[in-house]
Structures are given as structure tokens and as C-alpha cells.
Image (tube, rainbow, N blue to C red):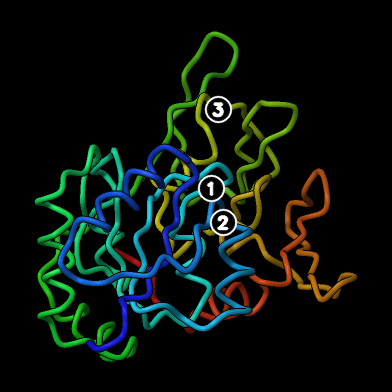
Amino acid sequence: MNHPLKIVIVEDEPAAASQLQFLLGQIDTPVEIIHIIEGVEEGLAWFQENAMPDLILSDIQLSDGVSFEIYEQITLETPIIFTTAFDEYAIRAFKLNSIDYLLKPIDQEALTAAIQKFKNQQLYHYSQLQSLLAQQAFISKNYRQSFLVKFRDKLLPIKTEDFAFFYIDQGIVYGQLLDGKKYSLEFKLEDLEQQLDPAYFVRANRQFILSRDCVVTIESYPHSRVNIQTQPKAPSDIIISKEKVTWFKKWLANEITIKA
């Protein structure tokens, strides 16, 4: 590679981003940091408006979500080295265009080895990589099959498939059942997003996680967004952002596969 390695860093902690820049400056390969992205929304906008870099160094947990929300909505041909303090995202990371997964704190030796791995490997087109990954013997993730919810002085077992959607209202997360009942849950939406099978549940926006079975219609909404109508009816509008509309429609039509 004759030109400097063009790198985008996705990291919401300034100190961690600075440390990555310092470590990259110590490797033999010339590098050029062309941009530092701090959040999901910024990342979606940047990757849609700019040419892809040679390599992405990406944290997973960002201030406004997880970085997978970026990469699952763009046509991704650029390899990623994931950097994170947590290891529970490893399987999901390698379903994307990932070449390595570094746990924080990152040391010089690990980063240098990851860059060398990038330089040595043959880069696959995204569709080729997806086909290759489908043939690999990854350990399937065991998604949540049921919940125990509090109701008065009892605990009720409820199958996950009986939930229409999950949403947050004034700091409380609720699970809305297909039969119209709802219960408060002691979970964060971010935790539920990791526990629910993405083939059947999707994070529509910051407020809602929807099941495939609850969606009734998709209605046009200002600024190229859409409003999702559900059954049972949601307590507020479920607006899908312009950037996520195409991906959501493909997910609903079962045109993409994102199961682990």
C-alpha cells in the first residue's frame, strides 16, 4: 500500500481516541486519521457523505447507542478493528466486516498485530464476506425465550414471542403484549436489544423495540421518515429516521438475515 493508511476512528471518549492516535503513530505503517466519529447519528451521516477509509477502528458502546447501528445500515466494504472494554459483543462484531476485536486497555503490541493482520489478509467484497461467514461454525447466541414479570405480588412467566413491542416512557421500560396487556420491566432497552433475536425484534428508534408481528402499516412522515402503525396501538408515534428507513423495510420484508 503506497499511500498512507486512511483510518476513521469511532470513539466517544476523547482520552481513548487520543491514545489510539498515539499508538497508531508508533507503528511502521504510515497512517492518516481522516476523521473521529463520536456517535451513531454522526457516524451514519459521515459514512453516507464521504468516501470510505481503508480501515475503521471502532469502539462499540457510544454515547447514543452501539456502533453496530451504523454498520448494519450502510454498505460496508471497509474492514473494522473493534475496540471495546466488553467481550459480549464478539460474535456480533465478527458478523460484520471485522478483522480483529481488541479489549481495552489496548496495548501497542495488540494494535500492531491487528494492523499487520489487516495488511496481510485478502480483502473480500462485503457480499463475499457475508457468504463466507454463513459457512463458518460460529456459536449461535441463545436469545431470551421468556420473561418473569412482576404483577402485584406475583411473578408471571411470559414467552418472548408474546410481546408486541418494548418501549421507554419517563424512564420506565414497558413490555406490550400482543393481547393488549403491558407490564413494567426491570431492563434497559439497550440490554433488551442484545437479548432479543434480531430476526424478530428490531430497535426502531431510541424509544421502541418492535416485533415483526406487531407492525400493521408503514406511513409516510415529513423529511423522508416513516411512521409505524402497530397492533396493539403504540402509546406514541414510532418514527423511523430517514437513514434507517430502507434497512427497516428490508428487515420487515425478511430480505436481510441478521441472526447470530
Residue that badge 2 annotates: 40
Q: Residues within 10 Å of mark 1 (few under 14, many from 20)?
A: some
Q: Residues within 10 Å of mark 3 (few under 14, many from 20)?
A: some
Residue drawn at point x = 26 percent, y = 44 percent: 88
* Residue contact between numbered discs 3 and 2, judged by CB atoms under 8 Å: no
Residue that badge 3 annotates: 185
x and y percent of residue 212 in the render?
A: 57, 64
Dot 2 amino acid type: Val
x and y percent of residue 142 in the render?
A: 25, 50
Residue drawn at point x = 62 percent, y = 49 percent: 165
Q: Is 188 above or below relative to 186? A: below
Q: Which mark is residue 87?
A: none
Dot 3 amino acid type: Leu
Q: Which mark is residue 65?
A: 1
Screen quadrant of the N terminus? bottom left
Q: Is 233 above or below relative to 30? A: above
